[in-house]
Image: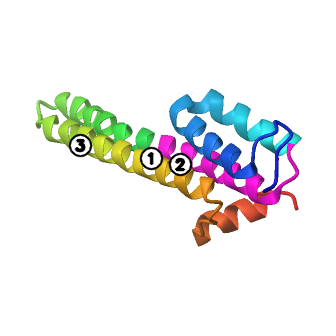
Amino acid sequence: MEKTKLGISTALLGAIACLACYYGGITATLLVVGAVLILESDEWLKKTCVRAGVLVFLFLLTSSIIYFIPNIISCINSTLGLFSVYFSIDIFSKLASWLSTLLDFLEKIVFIGLAFLAIMKVNVHVPVLDNFIDKHLNK
């Protein structure tokens, strides 16, 4: 079993990194992924940490887009209000809230699943994500 410079196995550090990315937010993600990229030499560990970091940012971007939709509708409604035309935006807010809850649930499942797979040192292959990581990760 390969050990990291911290003295723990690479699989355990990969699982810790996945959970830190989920529970710690952007700051923890940047610190954990940065530390692994700078200090560790194991390619599997680097790819696992970068995958977790990229997923954090994808979930954040998706969440931002979901909450941007009601803002756009509200802007359109306000503009139409200048011409005394109004429509209800309540349904869009409820839809955004429902989608956000669904996304949070999905995010939790993905990161807990990644942590369990990392502790078993199983490679997760998502072609689009792997191609992106391979393109930007120096080998």
Mark 2 lies on residue: 58
Q: Secondary structure at mark 2?
A: helix
| Quarter containing the N terminus | bottom right
Q: Marks 3/1: CA distance?
A: 13 Å
Give the mark nearer the N terminus: 3 vs 1.
1
Depicted 122 relative to depicted 51: above or below: below
- Measuring 73% from the left and 56% from the top, which residue is drawn there? 47
Mark 1 lies on residue: 62
Depicted 80 relative to depicted 57: above or below: above
Residue 72 position, x and y percent, is 33, 38
Q: Are marks 3 and 1 in contact (CB under 8 Å)?
A: no
- Measuring 64% from the left and 30% from the top, which residue is drawn there? 28
Query: 86 or 1, which is in the foreground?
Result: 1
Q: Marks 2/3: CA distance?
A: 18 Å
Mark 3 lies on residue: 98
Q: Are marks 2 and 1 in contact (CB under 8 Å)?
A: yes
Name the quadrant containing residue 136.
Answer: bottom right
Depicted 104 relative to depicted 41: above or below: above
Magenta region, main secondary structure: helix
- Measuring 55% from the left and 43% from the top, which residue is drawn there? 56
Please provide the residue range marked out in magenta: 40-61
Q: Furthest residue to the front?
A: 1
Residue 4 position, x and y percent, is 82, 44
Q: Secondary structure at mark 1?
A: helix
**Left or right: 64 in relation to 87:** right
**Left or right: 14 in relation to 65:** right
Name the quadrant containing residue 122.
Answer: bottom right
Could you tell me the amino acid type at mark 3? Trp
Could you tell me the amino acid type at mark 2? Leu
Could you tell me the amino acid type at mark 1? Thr
Q: Residues within 10 Å of mark 2 (few under 14, many from 20)?
A: few
